[in-house]
């Protein structure tokens, strides 16, 4: 079955600004200006790669959209200039979003008149770097969770303008849900969430009342999940919500701060680290819910989760049903590099770089 790519129009690129080099490093703009001023049209092969041992590609379709819509040149005087597209004069081959790649593996090549796309390097490398960072981090936690859902919750920790592409990068890497409509927009989804602390506070600190009002408004269109750490009594609050909401309660979310110890663990402290969402707290919540016949109520855990912590939970058999992961998914390195490696079909690269053909690349139409 043929693989598909997102349409360039999905990305709503600021075309005039990108074509003019507004988002590009000045030296790339200068390169394009020199080539045009001197009427130079070198036919080059540029290859793009990254150096991490294992990465999950993101931003490929976005980078292709930049090339399809912004490669070219302006013709005519400033007052009456027109944009002359250059995509049809380029031969671009690329892997797909979601592909796993190795260090130094070529993920894209661009062949053609360098003056048509020299100004775009900053933009397409930035798209690849940012989205691949998110995709790689999400895939790590998805693998660690061994099939359990991962909820992508870092929106509050970064600038809102990155949400759309980051959400799609998380989606292609296996996240089952995102928290904002913007994050879900590129595949036509919707943001999901739980009963928040703010609503609980607005209901006088009564989690059950907040969960009931949430369910009255959104059930059955949303899976009603109650955040149960407001009173630092996750077990007691989980039971209270389950009793009050019955079939309308899909799950509870444990989100105890890393500086607190939930009251359910006070009697047993001494032989384990009790702070935050400790494994013992999850077990206590599961035991209490099961004992009252609420086995169908899922337990979502969040608060400082990383791939390593999720793997430790899974290895220990902690009965969490889903993981909410936030700021850890924004950290790390996934830098991409682009090099001109051939000129007019002959090798021409800086010392230390060489053309690395990749049979996995597919010509982009």
Image: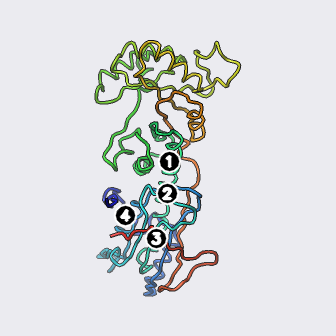
Asked if residue 205 lies left or right of residue 14, the reply is right
Q: Nearer the viewer, mark 3 or mark 4?
A: 3
Q: Name the residue: 30% across, 25% down.
A: 219
Q: Earlier in the sequence, mark 4 or mark 1?
A: 4
Residue 49 rendering spot, x and y as whole percentages: 53, 66
What whole-number distance in Å separates the C-alpha atoms at marks 1 and 3? 24 Å
Residue pointed to by mark 4: 65
Mark 1 lies on a secondary structure that is helix
Q: Nearer the viewer, mark 1 or mark 3?
A: 3
In the rendered image, the vertical position of residue 257 relative to residue 3, given as above or below? above
Mark 2 lies on a secondary structure that is strand
Residue pointed to by mark 2: 100
Residue pointed to by mark 3: 359
Q: Quadrant of the C terminus?
A: bottom left
Residue pointed to by mark 1: 139
Q: Quadrant of the N terminus?
A: bottom left
Q: Earlier in the sequence, mark 1 or mark 3?
A: 1
Q: Name the residue: 46% across, 74% down.
A: 118
What whole-number distance in Å separates the C-alpha atoms at marks 4 and 2? 21 Å
Q: Nearer the viewer, mark 4 or mark 2?
A: 2
What crowding class fits label 3: few (fewer than 14 Cα within 10 Å), some (14-19), or many (20 or more)? few
């Amino acid at each position: 079955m043929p693989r598909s790519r997102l349409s360039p129009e999905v990305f709503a690129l600021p075309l005039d600004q990108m074509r003019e080099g507004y988002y590009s490093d000045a030296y790339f703009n200068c390169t394009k200006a020199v080539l045009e001023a001197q009427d130079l049209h070198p036919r080059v092969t540029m290859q793009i790669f990254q150096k991490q041992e294992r990465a999950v590609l993101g931003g490929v379709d976005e980078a292709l959209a930049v090339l399809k819509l912004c490669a070219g040149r302006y013709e005519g005087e400033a007052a009456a200039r027109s944009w002359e597209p250059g995509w049809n004069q380029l031969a671009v081959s690329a892997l797909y979003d979601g592909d796993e790649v190795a260090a130094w593996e070529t993920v894209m090549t661009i062949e053609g008149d360098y003056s048509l796309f020299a100004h775009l390097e900053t933009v397409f490398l930035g798209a690849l770097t940012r989205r691949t960072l998110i995709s790689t981090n999400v895939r790590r936690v998805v693998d660690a969770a061994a099939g359990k859902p991962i909820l992508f919750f870092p929106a509050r920790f970064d600038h809102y303008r990155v949400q759309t592409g980051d959400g799609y990068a998380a989606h292609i890497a296996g996240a089952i849900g995102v928290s904002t409509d913007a994050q879900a927009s590129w595949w036509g989804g919707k943001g999901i969430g739980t009963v928040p602390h703010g609503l609980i506070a607005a209901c006088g600190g009564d989690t059950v009342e907040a969960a009931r009002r949430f369910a009255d408004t959104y059930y059955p269109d949303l899976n009603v999940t109650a955040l149960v750490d407001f009173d630092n009594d996750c077990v007691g609050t989980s039971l209270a919500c389950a009793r009050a909401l019955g079939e309308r309660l899909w799950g509870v979310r444990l989100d105890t701060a890393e500086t607190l110890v939930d009251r359910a663990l006070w009697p047993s402290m001494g032989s384990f680290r009790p702070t935050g969402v400790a494994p013992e707290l999850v077990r206590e919540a599961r035991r209490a819910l099961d004992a009252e016949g609420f086995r169908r109520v899922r337990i979502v855990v969040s608060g400082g989760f990383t791939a390593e912590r999720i793997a430790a939970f899974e290895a220990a058999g902690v009965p969490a049903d889903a993981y909410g992961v936030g700021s850890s998914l924004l950290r790390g390195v996934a830098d991409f590099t682009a090099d001109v490696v051939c000129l007019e079909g002959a090798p021409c690269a800086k010392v230390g770089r060489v053309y690395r053909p990749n049979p996995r690349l597919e010509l982009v139409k």
